[in-house]
Image (cartoon, rainbow, N blue to C red):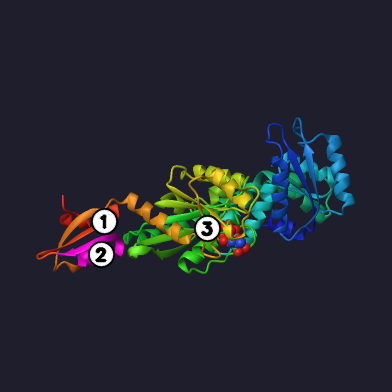
Amino acid sequence: MADFLTDKPAQLERAFLVGVQMPGMAAGEAAELLLELKELVENLRITVARTELVNLRRATPALLLGSGKAQELVDLAKADGADVIVFDEALSPAQQRNWEKLSGLAVIDRQEVILEIFADRAHTREAILQVALARMEYSLPRLTRAWTHLSRQRGKGAMGGEGETQLENDRRTVRDRITHLKVELDSVVKQRDVQRRKRQRVPIPTCAIVGYTNAGKSTLLNTLTGAQVLAADKLFATLDPTTRQLALRGNQKLLVTDTVGFIRRLPHGLVEAFKATLEEVVVADFLIHVLDVLNPNVEHHHATTLAVLAELGAGGKTMVTVFNKVDAATPAMLSRARRLAPDALFVSALTRIGLDTLEGRCLELIAEAHEATELLVPHRRYDVIARLYAVGHVQSEEQLDEAVRLIGRFPATQAAFFAPFVVK
Ligand SMILES: Nc1nc2c(ncn2[C@@H]2O[C@H](COP(=O)(O)OP(=O)(O)OP(=O)(O)O)[C@@H](O)[C@H]2O)c(=O)[nH]1
Ligand SMILES: [Mg+2]
């Protein structure tokens, strides 16, 4: 199949960004989103020539904006030598097509930019398949636009009968590929399931680190567990979940999973495609929500993460909220954060500030989930005691004449094993 879906953005070099303050949007929100769009576009190594913020009173079906305003923007973009116009608002396939016709430039929206970054970052088979699927579904209704590009490349005229046939063929190819990708993805997901079930046979409590992209999730996992996940000052550095074991006080073990970052206006197709990966979030015993205390949009990041979690069906999960990067924060940033989430902890994943407190909080959550139980284990059943130390948490151990008296906790899945020794 033609590579017009993957090649195009790689050729683009200078972008003209348009933010739209839509009716009903909070004041300044579009400006903030536009700044974030600039960062996203620069993450694709595309130079941003200019950003323009448009106040819109009523959206139009053809171009979203009025035609006078549209022409004005096209002139500006051309004067800047831009080869692509990027909208922060989602454009319908027809609007995108109309803009391309009007400007003769490539026209994309935030969703496509995010898809491109994900494609750029995907390295494992599962991530590559997930991103490919999301991109195919995004491009299916937009193929007419791609055909315009193709026909120009091939030096053909405007759409005729031949173009329509070609379009039909392209659509069929894309649909076939979507079906194919889904089947492949299914088998990868099954493998992951097998791995997870293997892990669950040794039932250690689990938690997932979630949060906005670039908050410091991977850095936190690395510092806590000595893992070596790539942590970098770029958006969506992590696409694949990594799980590592953390040994808390009293030899309480905890499995910690780092996950893909969230962002505002995350393409719905991506959330869908990454649902399997994000299963780790849904099955975790509790979540650590990491926020970048330095970021001026931290309130929006907080809300976005909660919204995506709700969409994943993980809205009601027990959660520790953590403001990261306090090593570089000003007092004003700290008090703002405290207002946003009064119960939150303040840490620096980089310099280890507050990590002992975080580990203590994790211990409390594990304790709340599994109540302490009294057990009497005969001396000869040393295996039972060893297992309690391995999969649970022992608060106290007392040697009696005929048995060992233990106060401790174990996961519910192990209840049957320990039941004969539990003191009623
Ligand atoms: N000053 C400071 N910087 C930090 C801290 N923790 C992380 N960072 C920096 O923040 C940037 C992003 O860190 P990551 O750990 O990659 O962030 P992430 O949340 O995993 O990001 P994605 O995988 O892109 O979602 C990196 O440049 C880190 O060095 C911290 O405690 N203090
Ligand atoms: Mg990461």
Task: Residue 104: give x, y in percent of width and height.
Answer: 84, 48
Task: Residue 363: give x, y in percent of width and height.
Answer: 37, 56
Label 2 near label 1: C-beta < 8 Å?
Answer: yes
Q: Is residue 168 visible?
A: yes
Residue at image x 76%, y 30%? 57
* Amino acid bearing label 1: Gln
| Image: 55 above or below 328 | above
> Mark 3 CB in 8 Å range of ligand 1?
yes
Which numbered marker is on residue 387? Answer: 2
| Image: 396 above or below 143 | below
**Which quarter of the picture shows residue 328?**
bottom right
Task: Residue 149: give x, y in percent of width and height.
Answer: 78, 51
In this picture, residue 197 sits left or right of residue 127? left
**Which quarter of the picture shows residue 356?**
bottom left
Label 3 near label 1: C-beta < 8 Å?
Answer: no
> Does label 2 or label 3 sit earlier along the sequence?
3
Pointer 1: what residue? 414
- Identify the magenta region: 383-399
Pointer 3: what residue? 347
